[in-house]
Image (cartoon, rainbow, N blue to C red):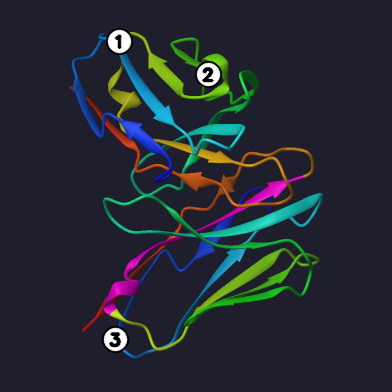
Amino acid sequence: ILNVEQSPQSLHVQEGDSTNFTCSFPSSNFYALHWYRWETAKSPEALFVMTLNGDEKKKGRISATLNTKEGYSYLYIKGSQPEDSATYLCAFTRGSARQLTFGSGTQLTVLP
Amino acid sequence: DTGVSQDPRHKITKRGQNVTFRCDPISEHNRLYWYRQTLGQGPEFLTYFQNEAQLEKSRLLSDRFSAERPKGSFSTLEIQRTEQGDSAMYLCASSSDRGRTEAFFGQGTRLTVV
């Protein structure tokens, strides 16, 4: 994998459902993996920065895991709410570079 | 400090005109980034400043694009002789240089070239 790939591209779930997204990234020369939530007309909001293989982070109903050896991260949302509707972006940084390389995002819509 | 601010929020311009966008980062952040996002894609890196020094530029940044960060505070991104393909959301972000911290983004400037 040369770039960041996210799946699915879009997702519709019912309120109360749990859901998860996948982010795949190049595993060589890994530095950090970032998850952002981007709501329409707002700034992308940082959710997690993950650096160590096996990292698990949690913020409320949202959690993420990281596997740097195989180059993937999962984002989980438990009991989705309509306010979770947003585009979820993952991005990685590699080696000495400081800029983020983003995936195309997963657009989540939570239906009431 | 309320975060990263960008101005203007929206800009409509005619093809061939020059446009300039401004970004005010979080005051204690010495790193500043510009990204461009088009429909259906994630943000793409354009350029990066450490204080006032522009340390990296993407190949996406053609010679019609120029960015500055005088005195290491706010930054401007200028696009000369705009083309319809320049229509996009231009995002600015800032971060600290201490460890693997997150970048904080502004709300972006939506450019439409007609």
Question: Distance of mark 3 from mark 2, alpha carbons?
Answer: 46 Å
Reply above or below: B18 against A31.
above
Question: Distance of mark 1 from mark 3, alpha carbons?
Answer: 46 Å
**Magenta segment, which residues?**
A82-94
Q: Residues within 10 Å of mark 2 (few under 14, many from 20)?
A: many
The part of the image, by quadrant, that contains residue B12 is: top left
Q: Is residue A88 magenta?
A: yes
Q: Comparing marks 1 and 2, which lies closer to the viewer?
A: 2
Question: What amino acid type should be assigned to the residue bearing mark 1?
Answer: Asn
- Mark identifier at residue A14: 3
Question: What amino acid type should be assigned to the residue bearing mark 2?
Answer: Arg
Residue at x 53% of width, y 14% of height: B70
Q: Which residue is mark 1?
A: B18
Left or right of B109 in this view: A70:
right
Element on which disc 1 rests = loop
Q: Which residue is mark 2?
A: B69
Reply above or below: B29 against A68.
above
Along the viewing direction, whichever of A8 and A86 lies nearer the viewer: A86
Q: Is residue B62 magenta?
A: no
